[in-house]
Amino acid sequence: MLNGSQYYPKIEAMTMEQIERIRLMESYLDEAEQAVNDMQEALDKYVAAQGLLSELNNYLGSEEWNQDYDDDAAGRLPADLKRGVLSQDGVWNVLDDSRQLNVRMLETLASILKNN
């Protein structure tokens, strides 16, 4: 494999170190930029889902939920109806995961702000 000085014989060793450093930093920039963009998109989706999470929280244990649960247990709902929301655990798990994610984001933000 040819190194950069073989392509550019007049380039001195220090310049080759600079080129390698710049290439490395450029790869860091590319990766960081992608991570920031991915986080922005994910955060936009997460923020948009907060209303859904609030609705689920209100539904869980409500009179409507209890009626839906009872009707399901009595076989009054269609057999092919997706009903994970009636399991309690499914809703509770996503609400708890969201709370834990909120704590993680706060801790991460505090660490980033402290170290930058």
Image: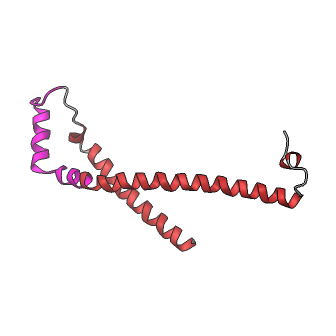
**Between 70 and 101, the one nearer to me in the picture:** 101
Magenta highlight on residue 72: yes
- In the image, residue 59 lies at what x, y percent? 17, 50
- Picture layout, residue 2 above or below residue 14: above
Q: Is residue 18 left or right of residue 9?
A: left
x 55%, y 55%: residue:
33
Instruction: Find out whether residue 52 is within the magenta segment.
Output: no
Residue lying at 14% horizontally and 34% vertically, measured from the top left: 72
Residue 94: x and y, percent?
32, 48
Q: Position of residue 1 (x, y in %)?
A: 84, 39
Please report the residue visible at 43 percent of the width from the left and 65 percent of the height from the top: 106
106 in relation to 87, above or below:
below
Quarter of the image for the C terminus: give it. Answer: bottom right
Q: How many marks?
A: 0
> Does 85 sit above or below residue 11?
above
Type of secondary structure dominating the magenta stretch: helix
Query: With 35 as the anchor, is 75 left or right in this view?
Result: left
Q: In percent of the image, x 89 and y 58: which residue is there? A: 12
Q: Position of residue 57 (x, y in %)?
A: 22, 53
Q: Which residues are magenta?
A: 53-79
Say which quarter of the image contains residue 90: top left
Front-lying residue, 52 or 76:
52
Q: How is the image coloured?
A: secondary structure
